[in-house]
Each structure stands twice: as structure tokens, then as C-alpha cells.
Amino acid sequence: MSADRIAGRTAVVTGAGNGLGLAIAARLSESGARVVLVGRSAVKLADAAARLSEESRVVVCDVADPESVSALAAELADEDVSILVNNAGIAGPVADLVDIEPDAWDEVFATNVRGVYLMSRALLPSMILRGAGDVINLASVSGKRPLARRTPYTASKMAVIGLTATLAWEVGPLGINVNSLSPGPVEGERMTRNFTRDAAATGSSPEQAREAFVSRAALHRMVTEAEVADAVAAMLHMPGLCGADIDLSAGMIAR
């Protein structure tokens, strides 16, 4: 894959201290981008920056907090940010809707939706002035199919998809590509914990719980962090992609 649409550009990645955010940041760094890692933990961000192949910058920021995001924008005033990857998100409560407290609901939307809005609002003006840029929002296939006892998360991810589509129409004519990427379940510790929990609830083994889960995907597996990172890079190499939502789920049908 040619790196000519990534190399030399400055990319801001939120939730970059670990997991998908770190994988995406590393992939963009390997492609020659100057990466700004954003997250709430200075320690995690410093560790993440040390793992990147190229020079990077760290900014501690709570994407759900308007003042924190404004401070980030001011700190990055000397950077020509032309790529924004809104990856920061939280899973929220696992419970029936009637048992979810409003504060827990609001916390999910504050990070997963308001964070995308605030970061885009803060960094889009400079892209608009230059007449070029890319925004990629991390949604989820869970926003497009039932996921029992996870209403705040699924609703927030569908909101991200709607935000993406409308924002693309607003800034697309100004030269800015806005898209969302909807991964399916990602291989890793979180899913392993879920299988252990499901096994305990059903009287099966974690291996059986895993098999039952991946059997719903055409490829009979989950996706990996590296595949999600590669998908972000691929989307940046598609200049005609705007207003799209891309499923990356190993064939776990979302609709």
C-alpha cells in the first residue's frame, strides 16, 4: 500500500493510550504520519508514544470535556492537523434499560458521541481553511444490530454513524472527507473476559462460549486490532470515500 496519502501529515488519534487507539496510531506512524496521541492517562500515552516508529506528540485530554478539548486545540495551534481519528469510547453498563441510571447513560454518550462532536468542532476549522482533511469516526456494528443489555453503547454508536453522514455533507464540499468505521468484536482480553462471564452464566466452558459467538461470523472468527488499524489506513487512501460507514466484522452481518 502506498503511503503517499498519509506520509508527512499530522494525525490526531483519541483514546490512543492502548487497544485500538494505539494500534491505529502505530499504523499511521509506520506510514510516515506525525501522530498526536490523545487520552486521559499521561502514563499510558507516554508508554504508547515510546512504542511508535516515528516522532509523536502526547496531549492529555478528556474528549467529553469542552474545556479540555479547547485546551487541546490551543496546544495544537502550531500543528497542521489534517487527520482526525475519533476512537475514544467506553463500553458503558451491561444491564436492562430499566435498570440503567441516567448518569451511566449520559457518561456513555458524553464520551462516545459528544467527544466526537467536540473534537471535530475543535479541529475542523483549520482543515476548512486549508480545504483538505480526513475525519474517521470509530463506530461499531453493534450500533446496527441488537445487543442485549447494551442500549447506551449501541445507541451511541448509531449516533456516531448519523453524525458522520451529516457532517460529511457539511464539510465534504469544502474538501474534507468524513467517514466512519464499524468494527465487529475485536480479538483481545475484553472478549476473553466476556466468554468467561457467558460460560459461567450458561454452565458451559469459555471455549464453547467463544465457538457459539464466532459461529455467527462468515469468517468464523473475530477481527484483530491490526486489521482495524489497516482499515483506517486503507480508508485514508480512498479519496472518493466520503459519508460512508464501513463494516469490518469478519462477516458478522449487521443488518
Image (spheres, grey):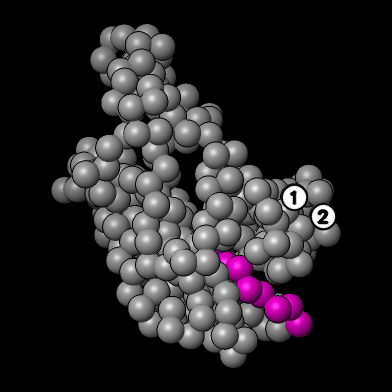
In the rendered image, residue 186, in percent from the top left (x then y), is placed at 47, 35
The residue beneath circle 2 is 54
Q: Is residue 245 above or below residue 163?
A: above
Between residue 181 and residue 150, name the one nearer to us.
181
Closer-to-camera residue (249/152):
249
Looking at the figure, which quarter contains the C terminus?
top left
Q: Is residue 81 magenta?
A: yes
Residue under pointer 1: 30
Disc 1 versus disc 2: nearer the observer: 1
Residue placed at 52% from the left, 60% from the top? Answer: 238
| Magenta-span inclusion, residue 249 | no
Prevailing secondary structure class for the magenta stretch in the rendered image: strand
160 left or right, relative to 99: right
| Amino acid at pointer 2 | Glu
Left or right of 212 in this view: 172: right
What is the secondary structure assignment of the residue under circle 2? loop
Q: Disc 1 on helix, strand or loop?
A: helix
The reply to whether residue 193 is visible in this rendering is no
**Which quadrant would residue 219 be assigned to in this image?**
top left
Check if mark 1's residue and mark 2's residue have beta carbons within 8 Å: yes
**Place of residue 222 in the rendered image (x, y in percent of width and height, measured from the top left):** 44, 29
